[in-house]
Amino acid sequence: MKRRNIGGGRFYAPLASVLLALSVGGCGTSGGNATGGAATSSASTTADGKPGTASHVRAEPAAWQKWGLTPLPAAPEPPADKPIRLSATGPVPVFAHVPTSQKVVFITVDDGLEKDPKFIDMMRDLKIPITMFLMNDAIKSDYGYFKPLQAMGNRIQNHTLHHPAMNTISLVRQKQEVCGDQKILTQQFGTAPFLFRPPYGAYNKNTKIAVGECGPRALVWWRESMQIRNMQYQDPGKKLRPGDIILAHFRGPAELKGATMTEMFANLLKRIREQGFAVARLEDYIQPPAGH
């Protein structure tokens, strides 16, 4: 999971050192203490806060053929009674999956380094819902790239300013990272994030304090991570389960050994289809606090 630096600054630590220091799988895998308590979701919205494209909307078969894919199963209607409920006050929960019996999984895409125009075309064609956890260092060169994705109903959530391992820095710095990204994302995209993903999956009690004071109301982990052609699984059985959250990244050929963002995403959809799952929107299964 080699990543390149932005502007010569410290962006991603080498995976080996992250594994050693954090005892978690870096950006692309998970473990550790992040399988914590239950949390929540909201209806999808566009940039102006209005309802967006529902996760059960189907793309035409020709659209799938265009990308060399077979259609996924149709996503069911999201439950009216949200399985995750977030409160505006109190401890900030951590979750890595959504309690549901529906055969759905949720795709989250992190960072924002790669800005491939063809990925926007792919998402517009296939109508696959995603949740974007964006980090300011990666997106500040072109905030506008993510607005068409947002306009499709895909929410933008918090992933820090500079991508530090949160459990290695002070509470003051953690607040700077979370509050700083929260302010910029809200200004740029018109809605305040209510979810936070800790870089590398690393967090501690100060992270929960910082997140709670900066606006998001839950930390989101994952159970699978997409690499180039295949997923890495936490489950020893190496299979998807209902409600699993999948981690992917905005990556391009430099990080994907020559593969493109759309090729990686197509492989992800193939792996999901092989196991008979539909893709739903994470926020459709979460009841956010009032005001979100």
Image: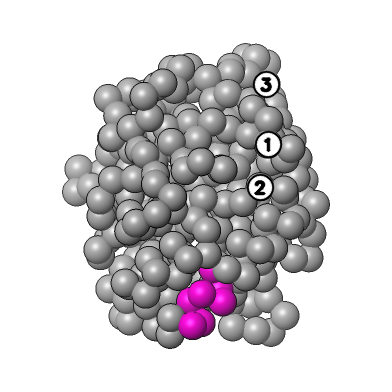
Q: Are marks 1 and 2 in contact (CB under 8 Å)?
A: yes
Location of the C terminus (image quadrant): top right
Quadrant in which residue 127 is drawn = top right
Q: From the viewer's perspective, is 221 left or right of 12?
A: left
Hey, what amino acid is under mark 3? Ala
Q: Is residue 23 above or below residue 149?
A: below
The residue depicted at 72 percent of the width and 80 percent of the height is 7
Label of residue 63 in the image: 3
Q: Is residue 174 magenta?
A: yes
- x and y percentages locating residue 196 in the rendered image: 48, 57
Label of residue 191 in the image: 2
Secondary structure under tag 2 reads loop
Report which residue position mark 1 lands on: 49
Q: Nearer the viewer, residue 38 or 23?
A: 38
Q: Few, some or many C-alpha atoms within 10 Å of disc 2 (few <14, some 14-19, many ≥20)?
A: many
- x and y percentages locating residue 6 in the rendered image: 68, 76
Q: Main secondary structure of the magenta part?
A: helix
Q: Is residue 187 above or below residue 132?
A: below
Secondary structure under tag 3 reads helix
User: Which residue of the protein is positioned furthest toward the top in this rendering?
Assistant: 61
Q: Which residues are magenta?
A: 172-178
Q: Is residue 91 magenta?
A: no
The CA distance from mark 1 to mark 3 is 28 Å
Hey, what amino acid is under mark 1? Gly
- x and y percentages locating residue 161 in the rendered image: 61, 71
Label of residue 11 in the image: none
